[in-house]
Each structure stands twice: as structure tokens, then as C-alpha cells.
Amino acid sequence: MKFKKPSLIVQIFVGMTLGIIVGYFWKDFAPSLRILSDIFMRLIKMIIAPLVFSVLVVGVAKVGDFKSVGRIGIKTLLYFTTAAIVALLLGLFLVNVFEPGKTMTLELPAANAEVGIEASKGFDTGNFIEHIIPESIVAVMAKNEILPIVIFALFFGVAAASIGKTGKVVVDFFDSVSHIMFKVTNYVMAFAPLGVFGAIAAVVAKQGLGVLTGYLYLIGTFYLGLFLFVFVVLFLICFFLKIKFFKLLGHIKEPVLLAFSTASSEAAMPKTIESLERFGCGNRIISFVLPLGYSFNLDGSMMYMTFATVFIAQAYGIDMSVTDQIMMLLILLITSKGMAGIPRASLVVIAGMLDHFNIPVAGLLLLLGIDQILDMGRSATNVVGNAVATAVISKWEGELHAFRKEPDIDHVKLD
């Protein structure tokens, strides 16, 4: 009888389970296993830039001109903005209804305690423009800064399409590169269970399972919000647009679990591209919407920003009025767009909000111990949110097709 290799999702579950066991029983040894997670994340980062660039160039070349790119871009940004507002409002609603900062008995850090996170100074147009427009495409690819890569690829793809047969040679080349990068992705994903094992073992060894007990109410409230956003908000969006939501979830279950177990949306990006193609989303839409989503449509992180800010205010007995909370929502809606590519961006933005409303920034210490656990949920939600966004834009553009057995990146036909 021929042995059937377990699916990737089964392997990841096994990695998570073994990681919990090893981290709990071998606390001295487990932290050294972080190297497995570090290797996996480096492998992921190794493939993101060439994968995004090649797929996006081919996709944009199919669009063909800046007018079409602009139309799709406007639809995409309108959807992103709407989803962000809903996520921010949901975070505010839950933290005000359940009041975890008032309900939980917490030992408050001193107001002048060192956090180790520099507060965001707010949205700076100059810095934002400098961030999204690359001085060197080589430099931004080396740093895996997705948004500048998207900007360059847009110009490159449209230019390649505009010169006809001469450009077709280049587009066909990047078409081949994208196929190769999908194959490389499959090779890298073979290491995912070990990466997950190392990440979970190190976290459990460092923080222990006891941290869950003290913060169970907070964690439960936040995860309830994530659940409502995915299975109510995103479900209703798909329902009204006649997109098969649960079928979509079935296709992206591997990248969602990968994002959850590694607490990194980035780790799931290559696999998400492949899964969305199999679901039937148009390749040019995937290549355009998904990379933008990693800078502008992080729904789980957006919800966390309002939730965490008000939670810390509650813990310190500071009452934020309705006006303050609406102002915070509007500031976050803008500020968060300028934080792409910054490590622990959510915490940086939250620190800025705390400072703006004269709430002790040291309150972040209340969350740092469980941030990894909360990050797992918001990373998985980010992946689902971007998958739904891609499906929505594909539907609006008439490019949501039937199930595909294999990824389909057609060669571009240029006149």
C-alpha cells in the first residue's frame, strides 16, 4: 500500500502541537528552536520580491494602460477604505461594550516605564511619498518593501504592454519567472511545518501557557471581534456579491493557518496568490490588489489599533469621549497607511495614539506579553480580508471564474 503524504495543513497542525509540547516541557531547550522559524521566514522573504514583481508585471501588462489600472485602483482603494472603517468601528464597539480594561484586574505599569517602542509622530505626507516612490528598485527589493515594488511594476508593466511585440518578449520572460517562483514557493512551503514548530515552541517556552489565564477575557473579546469581522462582515460582503465565501475559505485555509501559526501575514503571501488563482480570481487582479492589500488592507491590525488604545485608556481609568474616539478613528484611518513596512507597525501606531490623547504609552506593556497571541489572530484575519478584497475586485471587473485545478498565468497577447 502506497503511503500518502499528509497535506500541508495537517503538517502545520502537527508542528503547532509538537511546538506546544516541547515549549511547555523543555523550556531551556525550546528557545533555541527559534532558529527554525527564522530560517523559514528568511526563505519566505527571499521569494516575495521576485514573486510579487514578476506576477504584477504580467498582470499589469494584461490590463494594458494606465486608464484601466486607474479604474481598478480606484475600486480597490474604495473597498480598502470601507473595510478599514468597518474594522476600526468594530474594534471600538467591542472594547466599549465588554470594557476589558475595566473588567480585568491588572497591575498597571508606571506611567514613565520604558516600553522600547517609539511612538508614531502621525502621518507625514513627505515621508509617505518618499516611502512609496523608490529611488532604486534594487534597494526596495532587497528590503522587501512591497509598496514601492508595486509602483515600479505598474510603470514597467504598462510600458511593456505599450511597445507591442518588443515588450511581449519581456512579459513572456516574467511570465516564466512567475511560474518558476510558484515552484520555488512549493519548495519553501515544505519547510513550513518546521518553521511553525520552532516559532510555537519558542513562544510557549518564553511566555508559558499561564499568560492565557490572566488575559483570557481580553484575548477572548478580541478574538470574538476577529470572528465577527470574518464570519459576519466579510461573509455578508461575499453574500451580497454572490461570491462563495466558504469555498474561498477552503482554498485559502493553508495560508490562513500559516499566518496564524507564524503570526506573520507576509509568510502566507506566496501561498495566498496561488490559492486565489485556484479559486478563480483573475490573475491581473490578484497581482494588483493583493500586494496593495499588504499595505492598505490589514483588517485585523486595524481593529486591534482602536481596541488596544481604548483598552489601555480603560485600564488607567481615562475616559475617552465619543468625540475622542471618532477623532482617533479618523487619525488611524490616515496614519496607518503611512506605516507600511515598519516592524511591529500596529504597536508603533498605537503608541502614537496613546501619546496624542495623553494616555501613558507605558500601557503597551500590558499587551506586550500577549502580543504574539493577538498577532496570530490578526495576521490570519489580514489574510482572509485581503483574499475577500481580491475576490470582490475580481467580481466587479468580471474576472471571477470557475475553479481552476492549477494556477493559470496566461501568456500576454500584445499587438
Image (cartoon, rainbow, N blue to C red):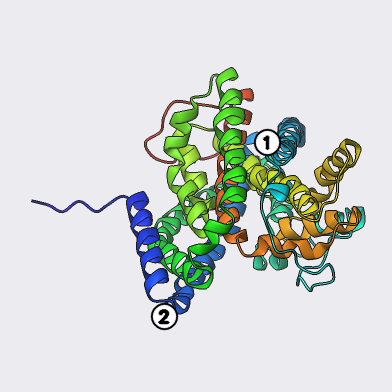
Left or right, 315 with reference to 320: left
Q: Which residue is mark 2?
A: 29
The image shows residue 278 at horizontal and vertical percentages of 44, 37
The image shows residue 53 at horizontal and vertical percentages of 62, 53
- Circle on res. 64: 1
Left or right, 151 with reference to 254: right
Helix, strand or loop under label 2:
loop
Q: Amino acid at mark 2?
A: Phe
| Residue projecting furthest to the left | 1
- Tell me which residue sits at (91%, 37%) in the image: 323
Please tell me how crowded label 2 is: few (under 14), some (14-19), or many (20+) other residues with Cα within 10 Å. few
Helix, strand or loop under label 1:
loop
Name the image quarter holding residue 118: bottom right
The image shows residue 107 at horizontal and vertical percentages of 70, 64
Callout in the foreground (1, 2): 2
For the question of whether residue 408 can be seen, the reply is no
Decide which of tag 1 and tag 2 comes sooner along the chain. Answer: 2
For the question of whether residue 206 can be seen, the reply is yes
